[in-house]
Image (tube, helix red, strand yellow):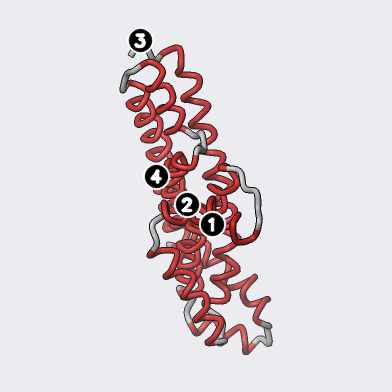
Amino acid sequence: MERVLPYLGLLVRGALITLEISTLSLACSLLIGVLVGLVATSRASAARAAARVYVEFVRSVPLLVQIFFVYYGLPLMFRLNLSPYQAATIALSLYGGAYMVEAVRSGIQSVGKLQWEAARALSLGYWRTMAHIVAPQAIRVTLPAAIGIFISLLKGSSVASIIGFVELLQTAINIRNSIFSLSPLFVAGVLYFLMCYGLSRFGGRVEARFRYGAS
């Protein structure tokens, strides 16, 4: 462990980069989840089917394959020039978005039909009903799930090292190759644990607060 101490700052910096790309991907996933989630709960059958295809396809294909496709496939198809950071962000956003769609859909569907009927009786339009009645209640279901998705994105970001993106895992591998010791990987594992455990505890508190507020 003494050999890895001089590189501890680099490992912490790698952890911060991991948090950065995971947070950015979560924000994009939330946007995708809300937009596609609204489509998934709409009355248009074709739109619902398209949303279902996206969700099922992304959730069925391994994240590694999606990262490879975004990094190597999209530039060939659309003549793009994507950096490893951009490709990883796109892949993680699409991956997290598929799970966020289900969280948003579950949140919307958790609102009882009687409340929708009451909103119609008050002559509230769809968007006003969604904003003032459905959304505040759906957040209670969606937010704890979003924290779980954040944890999945944080762990999934390690796969992006395969395309040369230097985050926590790739930083640990580079240091290991320099000092010929497994201690950097051990430290990286500890940092992953601290980040995921902290987020898990935070998610538990958020869920407990919502339950207390609902009661």
Dot 2: element = helix
Mark 4 is on which residue type?
Ser
Contact? badges 4 and 2 (CB < 8 Å):
no
Q: Nearer the viewer, mark 4 or mark 2?
A: 2
Mark 1 is on which residue type?
Gly
Tag 2 residue: 68
Tag 1 residue: 73
Tag 4 residue: 200
Q: Which mark is residue 2?
A: 3
Contact? badges 1 and 2 (CB < 8 Å):
yes
Dot 1: element = helix
Residue that protrudes farthest toward the top in the picture: 2
Dot 4: element = helix
Quarter occupied by the C terminus:
bottom left
Asked whether, in this view, residue 52 is left or right of residue 184, the answer is right
* Between discs 2 and 3, the one toward the N terminus: 3
* Between discs 1 and 2, the one toward the N terminus: 2
* Between discs 4 and 2, the one toward the N terminus: 2
Q: CA distance from mark 1 to mark 2?
A: 7 Å
